[in-house]
Amino acid sequence: MMISLKLMIRALSLALLPAFVHAAQAPTYMTDFFTGLHTLQADFRQEVTDGNNKLLQSSEGHMWIKRPGRFRWDYETPYRQQLVADGERLWSYDEDLEQVTVQKAADVLTSTPAMLLSGEQPLEKVFNIEEVITLDDEQHVVLAPKSDDSNVTRIQLVFSGKVLLRIKADDNFGNTTVFSFTDFDRNPALDDAVFVFTPPAGADVVGDID
C-alpha cells in the first residue's frame, strides 16, 4: 500500500509541533530542550493506527528541520518517498511512480501546526498544556489546540530527561500517529542545500513551479 500524501502531510504537521510549546508553561526539561532550537535531525519510525488500534501504516526514514519553515522527510521503507518544504513550496516525490507534486506551502499547510515554524502566531494562542505526567523514567506532556479548526485533538510528547523519544498525536479522523525517534541530534550544522529539491530527470511534475 502506497503511503498517502495527505496522510504524510498531516502526520508531519503533527510531528513538528514540539517547536511551538509555550515555554512559560512548559516543564523545565522541555524548555531546556527547545530553547534556542534552530535545527534538528533524527531517524524516525512512523506508525498510524485507527480507533480500533489497527495498524494502517508503518514506515521509517530520516528527517531534517531548519527553522523557520524548512523541513525534509525521507521515507525509506516500505516505499521511497520524500517531502521537502523549502520555505515557499512543498515538494512531494514518489520514486516508484516517478512523480513530483509541488504546491505552495502556504496553500497546503496554512491551517496546520507545521506552519507555526514561521513563528508568526503568538504561541499562547495556539496550545494549552493539559497534563504533565511522569511514568517510570518517562515524562509525558499533553497538549491540546485552542482552535476548534485544527485536525489535531490531542498531542503527547514523551521525554526521557532532556531527550525527546516520541510524539503521539490523535486527530479528528479517529487516527493516532506515533513518531519514535532515534539518533536525535539537536542543532547540527545543516546546509541550506538539504532543503532544496530539484525534480529528477524524467519525473512527471504536477503543480505550479513558477
Image (cartoon, rainbow, N blue to C red):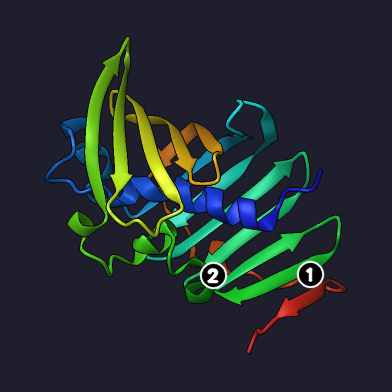
Where is residue 206 shown, x and y percent of the image?
75, 77
Where is residue 56 shown, x and y percent of the image?
69, 35
Where is residue 141 shown, x and y percent of the image?
29, 31
For mark 1, what is the residue? 200
Q: Left or right of 21: which side holds 159?
A: right
Tell me: residue 12, above or below residue 132: below
Residue placed farthest to the bottom in the image? 210
For mark 2, what is the residue? 108
Residue at figure coordinates x 22%, y 57% from the top left: 123
Mark 1, secondary structure of its residue: loop
Which amino acid, by three-letter code, is at mark 1?
Answer: Pro
Residue at figure coordinates x 55%, y 46% from the top left: 173
Which amino acid, by three-letter code, is at mark 2?
Answer: Val
* The image quarter in which residue 134 lies: top left
Residue placed farthest to the left in the image? 24
Mark 2, secondary structure of its residue: helix
Q: Considering the image in quadrants, where does the N terminus appear?
A: top right
